[in-house]
Amino acid sequence: MTVFVLQNNSLDRIGRLVMPCVDYCARHGLEFVDRSLTVDLDVDRLDIDESGGLLVYGSVGWAKRFKESRFGRWIDYDEDAFAASTWGPLLGERALNGRGEFMTVLEVSRRLASGGRLHLRPDRNDKAFAGGVFDAATWGEMLAERRSSFGVTLDDITCWASVAQPIDGEVRCWFVAGELVEASRYRRDGALVVERVEDPGVMKVAAELGGCYLPIDNAVMDIAFQGGDAYVLEYNKIHSAGWYAADVDRVLDGWVADLRSRAVSRPGISPSTASM
């Protein structure tokens, strides 16, 4: 039986991620193990039956802690495959921000100080900050917030910087075992609009973009619509992605089935790291 391994602290930030998993376990009679992500949490000492696979869900830090543990094979993440500098050039015109350049945090600050806006995301440290469009003021506010709230500076972070472009709408797409299983809109015309996607045309375009590149078989891909065309906006870990209006059961049904298949067919062997 697949066991869910859930983070149970910082629920003010991640409760919206974790609680749907708790509800799913209750409905389907599945076991879950919950712990707090603390400095002294030793994941390797947890006594968890992984014979049916582990579904790990929580913050980015939670997934990272498990990736670095003896349970790492259940974390669907590969830093190189998820890096914008990997998929941007590969996708080319199919990526909204495929044409970009590396910039340090200091270089970004200097560029924005001269005016204008940039679309910025961390190249590898995927949640050092949330990717988006920044001007000098919002960039400074983000850096100050990271220092005050988390006690960290981002001086060592390399950013993928590109020209800011207008976007008509944004949709989050869930892929499990390499197949599109669910999608939710989360923005339209710059405003937060959360609704499940049921339009076959949108699903077809999303599946086609996923066929161009997925960093790993179980992943979340955000796409942007501009005019009548769709582009890849970014990829995220499936372990930490917000649900918006997705049918959670559809995603978790597929994910659990994939984990059980992996547990049976490849016991003790890590999943493939990328599909290109």
Image: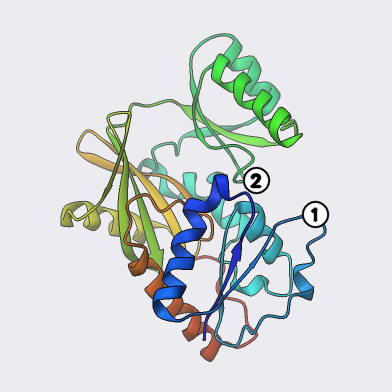
Kindly report which numbered mark, 2 or 1, lies closer to the viewer in this rendering. Answer: 1
Whether 128 is drawn above or below 256: the answer is: above
Q: In this rendering, does residue 276 appear at all?
A: no
Element assignment for label 1: loop
Residue found 62% across the figure and 77% down from its top: 270
Tell me if mark 1 has few (under 14), some (14-19) or many (20+) residues whose alpha carbon lies within 10 angstroms of its own.
Answer: few
Q: Amino acid at mark 1?
A: Val
Point out which mark residue 39 bears. Answer: 1
Pointer 2 with pointer 1, Cβ within 8 A: no
Judge from the rendering whether residue 63 lies leftward or rightward of residue 245; answer left or right: right
Residue found 48% across the figure and 44% down from its top: 88
Q: In this rendering, does residue 267 appear at all?
A: yes
Q: Residue furthest right?
A: 40
Which percent across, then down, holds residue 276? 46, 62
Q: Residue furthest left?
A: 200
Between marks 2 and 1, how big is the CA–CA gap? 19 Å
Judge from the rendering whether residue 135 lies leftward or rightward of residue 8; answer left or right: left
For disc 2, the marked residue is 125
